[in-house]
Image: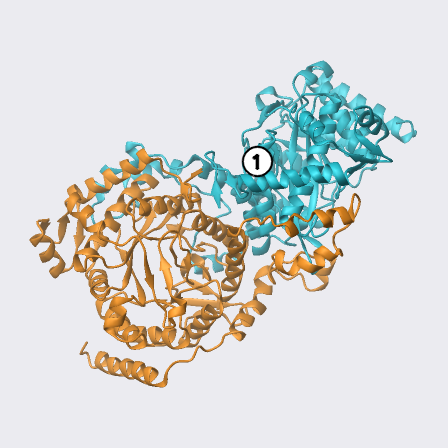
Chain colours: A cyan, B orange
Amino acid sequence: MIFDSGGRAQVLTEEQLDVVHERACDILEKIGTDVRHESTLRRLRSEGQRVDGSRVRWDRAFVEELVAKAPASFSVRGRNPERSVTLGGGSLVLTPAGGAPFCSDLERGRRDGSMADYLELVKMTHASAVLTCQQSGVVEATDLDDRHRHLYMDYGVIRFSDKPFICYGGTGERAADGVALAAIACGGREAIEESPALIGIVNSNSPLVWDGAMVEAMTVWAAANQAVAVTPFLLVGATAPVSLAGGLAQQIAEALSGIAIVQLTRPGAPCMFGSFLSAVDMRSGGPAFGMPEGVLGTLAGGQIARRYNVPYRGGGGLCSGMALDAQAASESLNMLWATFLSGCDLVLHAAGWLEAGLTTSYEKFAMDIEVLRMFATMRQGISCSEEELAYDAIAAEGPGGMFLGSAHTLEHFRDWVFMSPLFRSQAYPNWVKQGSRRADETATAEWKHLLDTYEDPGIDDAVDAELQEYVERRRQKIEAGDT
Amino acid sequence: MIFDSGGRAQVLTEEQLDVVHERACDILEKIGTDVRHESTLRRLRSEGQRVDGSRVRWDRAFVEELVAKAPASFSVRGRNPERSVTLGGGSLVLTPAGGAPFCSDLERGRRDGSMADYLELVKMTHASAVLTCQQSGVVEATDLDDRHRHLYMDYGVIRFSDKPFICYGGTGERAADGVALAAIACGGREAIEESPALIGIVNSNSPLVWDGAMVEAMTVWAAANQAVAVTPFLLVGATAPVSLAGGLAQQIAEALSGIAIVQLTRPGAPCMFGSFLSAVDMRSGGPAFGMPEGVLGTLAGGQIARRYNVPYRGGGGLCSGMALDAQAASESLNMLWATFLSGCDLVLHAAGWLEAGLTTSYEKFAMDIEVLRMFATMRQGISCSEEELAYDAIAAEGPGGMFLGSAHTLEHFRDWVFMSPLFRSQAYPNWVKQGSRRADETATAEWKHLLDTYEDPGIDDAVDAELQEYVERRRQKIEAGDT
């Protein structure tokens, strides 16, 4: 595996990058994509694209010109502007898992996600220094009516955290609600059009379909100048060809056509090239996360995004394991190393992902955060100050000495040695005496500790009232069937 | 983190490399090392080194000149010459865990290692395609008398495998027995002096001590032109300063002085720059494997070895976890990624290491092998043949299609999708129905399968008789106290 000068993996040669790009253009021009959205079809026709029913055959120059309008980097502000994040250049903005209908912890078991669970996870995300962006959808609040659940979930991240957030979205209406709430929280629509305040995620219905809800969501966000991560959902062997190269060509076709729609809506709107690419376990048909295909796909995705000079959404602590065991940990670590080496800008699912994404695990949340802390330490590299070169300490001990109790060690170990409550080294008999507890069991105390350390960032009463009023008004409208 | 053009991490700048080298030379010249070996001390004095008791203060030019005599790459032959391995250039020769007094599997429990366990693990190593070198010491045969156990263990790898092996060693006498057995197995002493047939490991007694047994072992191996991996055993905060930079300076001083002794014994003898560097868990004093210090230390070690143009021994699936749980897996994966990214030539402890190395776990052995298979797949990168670009398959499915049952998928998935018996994706209800088994439990079937697939490579009857005769003769001599 080779790397560029920025330390980002180059798993494709320049020639291979050209080849997959060319194939993606062939796919766009000859096979085309479906775009199930009338006004977008009309617009594309008026721009000279060949439209046949909902099938669009895209001219490559047209697509490339639009993609070139996307910014190479941009910021997303939090409700607290000091918590703003920049996306671009391998910025590694980390968010927790999202989209799971279930959640689990060892004490309360595996269960349908509820609003109470959701708010706990939002607070844990706020309390974690390594997670710099919230995810509205860290678990589904399935105890709320799904017609207006998104309002309460978006309100939840805005009220109980002041970090930037990924909007619930999924339809144009929900996207618009997210924008309206962010505008209330951050100084009005004009202010957030100036300085984006949320990130929206859109997935193509792979292969090669942009459905109406997704197009509507992305045009709403783009029109408001909010950030959109355009992410094909590729399982090679199911929603994409069984080969990585074919999957990448399809990914490019889908992502570029999505980005083109964003840029057609509002030239210069912030958007990202997204990768969510894994193999399928051919024995079950289920997605196989953390395997070589996912690692290589994540690494290749970063290269491809850089080719188009657009920030990259990819990676995360993905796994297929059903429990927080050695399988889940190995898969997650593979994907987190790929995340780390691919130059990711936005990382969804960096903490808590379990069971192929169907469950957000409190214990895995705690464990992933410790692993992410390790990566933060590793990224700092090695420092060679005089004090760290430690010549005097070595001279003082001399041959046959012992540094465990030396003054140099006692002075510095707290700052220089990575220590984690979840990664301990102890003697086997002591471990047995303490109950032979596995890592998932010791993680219980850690997620509780994280939740305990949550501090409410507070919110201006008038803003909060306006947010709540908006939520209530919209809920009533939705219930009345008047969206 | 940045990388060189060969994909190997560069965690130290050129300037930092110079600084740690300079400090190492200062350590050698001003502090010195103890060398508790009379004839080596005499030799060093006669070469003009300052010797004071057992303390040697090394002249840097003298050391550098000797280190320059070490070959940049060399081969080690197996009993079957087709199984020879080359060390150098990031060759990634993988061996199982070594040195553990205990072994464990879920069915038979954790126990003192026995000869029966040892032979099972030797056979599993032979049966694994990814492990290309045996380790005499994959578990201690504690049921054998420790005065002549090494004879039976070295004989075990030679008889039941035809791969190259790491000799038991640890003293000059044992090193000599290993050489004698390898000579019998591989065509005589002259033949193995021509073409090395074993690898010996020597560790300094850090900080800065070369004890008599280790020096004796390395001079025996070097005199016979067998490969020696000179490996400081550094736990930063215990046997080395608490800072990585200080640990690296000490590591260089110890490794270069060891390599100098090898080259003084026989100029040009094959040897390796070894790294075994981890942090100490300051809460227990135990070694903390798989943490950022171990990752960065492993990566830096590779850079340093390349600076001296000597093959690199480092890495491995090291962990501190007491069970094959999420902790052990996360630690191991961190270290295996470091192994993969550091340009390692020889990797000890690549499979089976558990409990900070005190136990060789059969389940972890099976699991590590699957992870090593993943790395082998990832190293192959992405291929972009026409068939893999899959344009026709994408065209055949078109927007809204499904590749799960497509002809292209059915034709290729067996070859193109990584599948492992230990990494499965399934539906949660099915997993529960099948007993909610964790990865360590499913690994039981896998190590048994590996053992079942073992095929005896056979051995020439006359050679075997000679080996057994040597073992018996030496056993009697040792029991008679006549070594």
Q: Quadrant of residue B172?
A: bottom left
Instruction: Read off the residue under disc 1.
Output: A344
Task: Give whichever of A227, A137 is nearer the camera.
Answer: A227
Estimate the x, y position of residue A310 in percent, counting from the top left.
Answer: 61, 29
- A409 vs A29, left or right, is left
Q: Is residue A184 left or right of residue B342?
A: right
Q: Position of residue B8 (x, y in %)?
A: 42, 44
Q: Residue at x 29, y 61 (%)?
A: B227
Q: Is residue B127 above or below residue A431?
A: below
For the residue pair B120 and B242, the one nearer the viewer reads as B120
Q: Is residue B53 visible?
A: no
As displayed, is residue A79 above or below residue A112? above
What residue do we see at 64% from left, 58% from top? B424
Q: Quadrant of residue A161?
A: top right
Residue B403 appears in the figure: yes
Q: Residue at x 51, y 54 (%)?
A: B375
Residue B56 spot, x, y in % from top left: 14, 50
| Residue at screen point 33% across, 53% down | B311
| Count of all numbered marks drawn on residues in the image | 1
Q: Secondary structure at mark 1?
A: loop
Q: Is residue A22 above or below residue B72?
A: above
Q: Position of residue B312 (x, y in %)?
A: 34, 52
Horizontal side, residue A44 vs residue B454: left or right: right
Amino acid type, callout 1: Cys
Q: Nearer the viewer, residue B58 or B262?
A: B262
The quarter in which the C terminus of chain A is drawn is top right
Foreground of the two, B132 or B255: B132
Pointer 1 local density, CA inside 10 Å: few below 14, some 14–19, many at least 20 = many
Q: Is residue A474 above or below residue A302?
A: above
* Subunit under mark 1: A
